[in-house]
Image (cartoon, grey):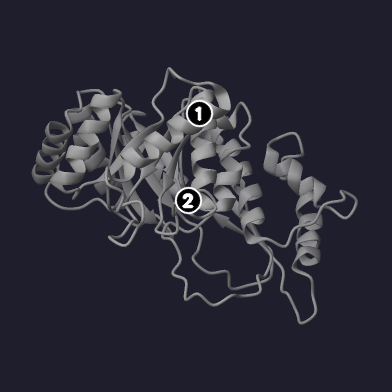
Amino acid sequence: MNPVRPLVAVKAKLGELTALASLRSHGASARVMVELLDSVTPTGRILPALVRAAAQAAHQGRTLWLDTTWLTANSPLVQQPGGVFEFLDHAIEVAAQAEYGLFAPDSPYLVPVVTLDATENELRRVRLLLEHQDRDVAIRLPQPGGPLRELLGRIDSIMRSTGTRQGRVHMILDAGFVESVRPGHAAAAAETASALSDLLGPAKTTLLAGSIPAKRTTYVTTERDRPEVTLWNEVRHARTNEVNYGDYGVTHPRPPRSDGQPRTPNPYLCYTVPGKTVLLRRKVEDGDDPAERFTDLVEELVERADFAGPGYSWGDDELTRCRRTGGRSTGSVSRWVAMATSHHIEHVARRSAADL
């Protein structure tokens, strides 16, 4: 297994879920946390895609981590009688049995990710889930801060409320969007990580951060450093490799707010290379076909020396097919994100800490 043990957090959207359903052998070794959104509804297109991805993961002996951080009280998942995790666990189980004949999987169908301020009712439902089938539990901690004694006391309370045993709890130390590594940032994260390791054991804490900007402001191809890698390296050196790496893939850490107004997409791609992200973008003028403009973008990307090649991942293969000679085109944002996410997961799963 790759010693980096990466965790990639992706939003529950069609593009990201398409990438998960297409993971190859290396990429499948990465842990994936799907951040559930209010747009996941029992009657929509996203829920079936999520269930299929989770069922496939179970068939391959993997387990998706499902996170409720962004769900509001208006979420149809929250309003299910048994709660989010029971509803999804059952849906995945039905799909896994129907698609793969998987009646007794070696791994659970999902790992619940709860917030630090989860209610007692939410924790009670997690306990019932564990009683149905034993599994790990992950706790998501926002930007490091606050008294460590209170933090550790709250974690202990969550463990008792859910009945989770020592060694089965993971902490996600969420640094959010990182533009650059500020003085003291790594030290604060390392102090928290150290206390968590003492409580939960080594390699049970993941530092999660991302540096993809919320908006694309230029049409010139640029390279951006990935400060999340720098931050993680500084923290893990302070903790002798006891902290796992995590990032937000190829999207901004916070889900965008939508005003419901349709927009003509300007083709873009965030392509991960060692230590950097290559950002490519094209402008759609009146009368332009977004798929054609994306083809222009791909022609530039595949000629770069740092393009991984069609055999690297499903996404890289699809990108190669989107060349003018490849016979395929796409004007869909979800498809662009799917290809970039597929490449990114493969990248972090294959790389060592030295060239992440």
Q: Decide if residue 293 is on the left or right side of residue 67.
A: right
Q: What residue type is labelled 1?
A: Ala
Q: Which mark is residue 12?
A: 2
Query: From what the image shows, is residue 129 above or below residue 279?
Result: above
Residue ID at (47%, 26%): 62
Q: Is residue 244 visible?
A: no
Whether residue 210 is visible to the viewer of this picture, yes or no, is yes
Front-lying residue, 215 or 235: 215
Q: In which quarter of the image is the C terminus?
A: top right
Q: What element carries label 2?
A: loop
Query: Could you tell which of marks 2 and 1 lies nearer the N-terminus?
Result: 2
Decide: few, some or many residues near mark 1? Use Cα within 10 Å; few <14, some 14-19, many ≥20.
many
The residue positioned farthest toward the right in the image shown: 325
Whether tag 2 and tag 1 are in contact, CB under 8 A, the answer is no
Tell me how far mark 2 sits from mark 1, CA to CA.
Answer: 19 Å
Q: Position of residue 45 (x, y in %)?
A: 55, 53
Identify the residue at horizontal 27%, vertical 42% (top origin): 82
Q: What residue type is labelled 2?
A: Ala
Element at label 1: helix
The numbered mark at residue 96 is 1
Name the quadrant containing residue 347.
Answer: top right
Locate residue 62 relative to residue 311 in the image: left or right: left
Left or right: where does residue 98 sit relative to residue 188? Answer: right
Residue 80 screen position, x and y as percent: 31, 49
User: Which residue is found at the position 61% from the left and 34% from the top?
Assistant: 23
Q: Which label is found at residue 38?
A: none
Asked whether 79 or 320 is in front, the reply is 79
x and y percentages locating residue 8 in the rendered image: 47, 42
